[in-house]
Image (cartoon, grey):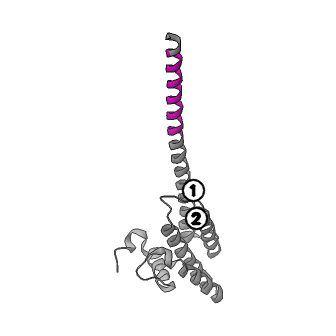
């Protein structure tokens, strides 16, 4: 009886240890995935911001397209942080920036297509007033004032 009790207690300890290991292991995996996602987004966001500030028009367009590709990738991987509204807003602003760059080089038809694409995100953004013009205005404010100052000035 003593041996049976000892074996049962070892098996119980093993089961509890396995359960705890799986639980904490999955939590660590989720945290690692989130950390890598945040690092990737920060890297590409910083790259885009730097190119918008210091790059040529061609490198700006390239950086924006790369950022949009990252957003598309995010749409296929649901996240509590990267919600549909956040991804839609980022995409709309990026397309408005592409429209401005296309307009600058005289590609009016391409600029109109980019603005149309930007406005297509309006249902997901959730703004009180949303249009291509409003998105363009927000891009101009954000690029001129920065993200934290733009919200306080009407």
Q: From the top left corner, tell me how far across and down residue 132 is, in percent.
A: 51, 84
> In the picture, which quadrant includes the C terminus?
bottom left
Among numbered discs 1 and 2, the one appearing first in the sequence:
1
The residue that label 1 is drawn on is: 40
User: What range of the chain is rendered magenta?
Assistant: 5-25
Magenta segment includes 7: yes
Q: Quadrant of residue 29?
A: top right
Magenta span: predominant SS is helix
Magenta segment includes 45: no
In contact (CB < 8 Å): disc 1 and disc 2: no
Q: From the top left corner, tell me how far across and down residue 6 is, in percent.
A: 50, 15
Q: Quadrant of residue 98?
A: bottom right
Q: From the top left corner, tell me how far across and down residue 24 is, in percent.
A: 50, 38
What residue is drawn where x is 52% and y is 58%?
A: 79
What residue is drawn where x is 39% and y is 68%?
A: 148
Give the SS element for disc 1: helix
Residue 46 is left or right of residue 59, and the answer is: left
- Foreground label between 1 and 2: 2
What residue is drawn where x is 64% and y is 70%?
A: 62
Q: From the top left corner, tell me how far across and down residue 49 is, in percent.
A: 53, 67
Q: Which is more toward the observer, 151 or 18?
A: 18
Q: Residues within 10 Å of mark 1 (few under 14, many from 20)?
A: few
Give the SS element for disc 2: helix
Q: Which is more toward the observer, 39 or 120?
A: 120
The residue that label 2 is drawn on is: 75
Q: Is residue 35 above or below residue 125?
A: above
Q: Which is more toward the observer, 135 or 28?
A: 28
Q: Is residue 14 above or below residue 29?
A: above
């Amino acid at each position: 009886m003593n041996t049976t009790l000892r074996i049962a207690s070892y098996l119980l300890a093993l089961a509890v240890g396995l359960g705890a290991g799986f639980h904490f292991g999955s939590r660590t995996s989720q945290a690692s995935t989130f950390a890598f996602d945040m690092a990737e987004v920060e890297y590409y966001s910083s790259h885009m911001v730097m190119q918008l500030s210091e790059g040529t028009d061609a490198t700006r367009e390239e950086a924006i397209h790369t950022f949009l590709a990252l957003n598309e990738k995010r749409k296929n991987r649901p996240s509590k942080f990267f919600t549909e509204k956040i991804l839609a807003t980022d995409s709309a602003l990026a397309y408005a920036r592409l429209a401005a760059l296309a307009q600058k080089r005289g590609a009016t038809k391409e600029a109109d297509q980019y603005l149309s694409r930007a406005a297509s995100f309006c249902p997901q953004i959730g703004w009180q007033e949303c249009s291509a013009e409003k998105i363009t205005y927000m891009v101009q404010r954000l690029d001129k004032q920065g993200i934290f100052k733009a919200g306080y000035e009407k």
